[in-house]
Every structure is written in structure tokens, then in C-alpha cells.
Amino acid sequence: MKSNRPVPDRLLDAAASLFAREGYDAVSVRQITSRAKANLGAITYHFGSKEALFHAVIDRVGAHLAERFAEIAGGKGTPLERIRGIVTMVLSEPNLPAPAMILRELATDRPLPPPLVALMRRNLGEVMSLIREGQADGSIRAGDPALFAMSVMAQPFLLRMASRIPRDIAGVMHDDPDTHRALVKHVVTTITRSLAS
């Protein structure tokens, strides 16, 4: 049965699912168009190439994350409170972009796709701005804002994208709500203490 949804949307959905599960290199144009119930030339017609479709998928799945970063960074509270909000969101938000797809890309030897670089720079930039703001008001200790921002985001992103590490290695079952809250509290406290002046 053919879907009434526009072909580009079906291609984006199919590609996002396949890229997340198998990785960019392992997915063929035929697999994407078959899953999207589109003809074989649909990717070229609508996106130009498989790579351009991949970039569009990254843009699409990253948009929500970028909006959440900007919303929290621009919200109320001290710089440290807003950083805590971002860390909590990364660990808890149910609709983050496909972590498996991003992790697969980070694990390859090829250069990161430009849309992924832009997304990561934008989000890291929000954290760096908060760190600079906190350094200016004296609430965050002196140091390189870029290095601080990378340190702040490394822990929550690793725990989120490689969620099997806490479960399989440390026995932390973060699917349990109480355990998840304790994990978030621990990470937020650790990061806050590392930044506070």
C-alpha cells in the first residue's frame, strides 16, 4: 500500500532508520528507496545524492537538539543553572537525534559531515557562551571556555549515546526511573563542581 506522505519525507524517515541501524556506508540507495516505497531514482531527484540525503537526515534529526540547547541556554537562571539544564536535557530528553547514527559517524575515519560539524559547533557554542558569562560574573572558574565546554558535554553525551556502558559495564540500570534520576543528579553535580569558582 502506497503512503500519502510526500516522497522526500518518506526517504528521510527510511534513511534515518537505516543509517542509525547500519551506518552510512552499509546502506544502499536501493534499501532506502525500497523502505520508503519510492522509485530508485527518487533520492537523486529529490536530494541529488545519497550523501546529500544523509546530510538532510542529520539536519532534520539535529534540529530538535539545537532548538533545545538554544532554549535552555537563553532561558532564566545563572549560567551554572542553565548548564545544569542542558546536561539534564541531554541525559533525559526522549526525542534526541538518533544517537546510534551520530556515534557511528564519530567512529569512522572519514571527516565528519558538514551538517554534523555545524550542529556540534552550535551546541558547544551555547555552552561556551554560558561558561564565558559565568566567568564574567565570577560564578565559573577561570579557564579555556572551549575546553570546559567539551568536558561538560563529553560525559552526558557518552552516557546517552553509549547507553549500554552504564548498564553492561557498571550495572547501572538507567531504565529504572529512580536510578536514572540518581545518575542525572550525579553527572550534574560532578560537572557543576568542576566548573564552580
Image: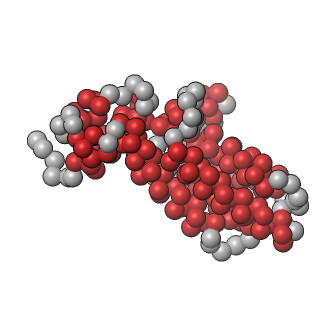
Q: Is residue 69 left or right of residue 24?
A: right
Image quadrant where residue 23 sits: top left
In-front residue for pair 161/134: 134
Across and down, in percent, residue 38 comes to: 19, 39
Residue lying at 24% horizontally and 44% vertically, measured from the top left = 45
- Residue 160 to residue 74: above or below: above
In-front residue for pair 30/187: 30
Q: Is residue 99 left or right of residue 10?
A: right
Q: Residue furthest top?
A: 26
- Residue 83 to residue 118: above or below: below
- Residue 29 to residue 114: above or below: above
Q: Quadrant of the C terminus?
A: bottom right
Residue lying at 45% horizontally and 51% vertically, measured from the top left = 59
In-front residue for pair 66/87: 66
Q: Quadrant of the N terminus?
A: top left
**Res. 76 in view:** yes
Q: Is residue 7 left or right of residue 150?
A: left
Residue lying at 21% horizontally and 52% vertically, measured from the top left = 6
Across and down, in percent, residue 106 comes to: 57, 34
- Residue 41 to residue 84: above or below: above
Q: Is residue 161 left or right of residue 8?
A: right
Q: Residue furthest left?
A: 1
Across and down, in percent, residue 5 comes to: 20, 52
Across and down, in percent, residue 4 comes to: 15, 52
**Res. 13 in view:** no
Image quadrant where residue 2 sits: top left
